[in-house]
Image: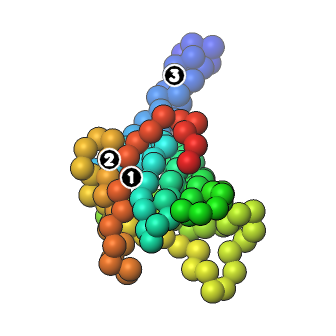
Amino acid sequence: MPIARIAPWAAVLAAACLCACTQPPDDSPDRLVEERLVGTWLREYEEDATRVRRVLVLAPDGSFRELASVSAAAGPATQHSHAGEWRFDGTNLKRRYTHMDGRQPAAPVVPFATFELKFQSRDEFLGIDNVHRRQVRYRRVTDGTLP
């Protein structure tokens, strides 16, 4: 058989082998929750006459941005901006802060936050902080929401 007739078939066979070697999509339950977490989330609460609004933006590349507005009963609101990396380990949403108000975290600040997740609905989750024994509630909001 002439090489000119074999070459096209060899190219098709090579392409088929390359396609077969690609990874299948990751549709594991953990990956589905991780995809569900991507987006913008709002947490609002009051503590000791101080009102706090936190906007948490979880990006698909594993980075996050957190903007906060803290308003005391007397005085102007203070703004905070944090950033870092996030991941979901199958049970917990884990965040590692790399910047807090434009600076790298330093002692005594612990630059980690870990919450066991329980979804209340598609657009709301409860985070359980087992270390500090508290619960936080986040609800999905539109991209661009400010604290």
Q: Could you tell me the amino acid type at mark 1?
A: Tyr
Task: Determine crowd level at label 2: few under 14, some 14-19, many 20+ residues with C-alpha closer than 10 A.
Answer: some
Q: Looking at the image, which is closer to me, 85 or 43?
A: 43
Instruction: Tell me the CA gap for discs 2 and 3.
Output: 49 Å
Amino acid identity at mark 2: Glu
Question: In which quadrant of the rendered image does the N terminus lie?
Answer: top right
Question: Sequence order check: which comes first, mark 1 or mark 2?
Answer: 2
Instruction: Give the number of the disc on residue 138.
Output: 1
Residue placed farthest to the front in the image?
A: 74
In the image, residue 34 above or below residue 75 = above
- Front-most of 30 and 102? 102
Residue tagged 2: 124
Per the model, the C-alpha gap separating discs 1 and 2 is 6 Å
Q: Residue at x 38, y 67 (%)?
A: 115
Label 1–label 2 contact, CB within 8 A: yes
Residue at label 3? 12
For mark 2, give the secondary structure: strand
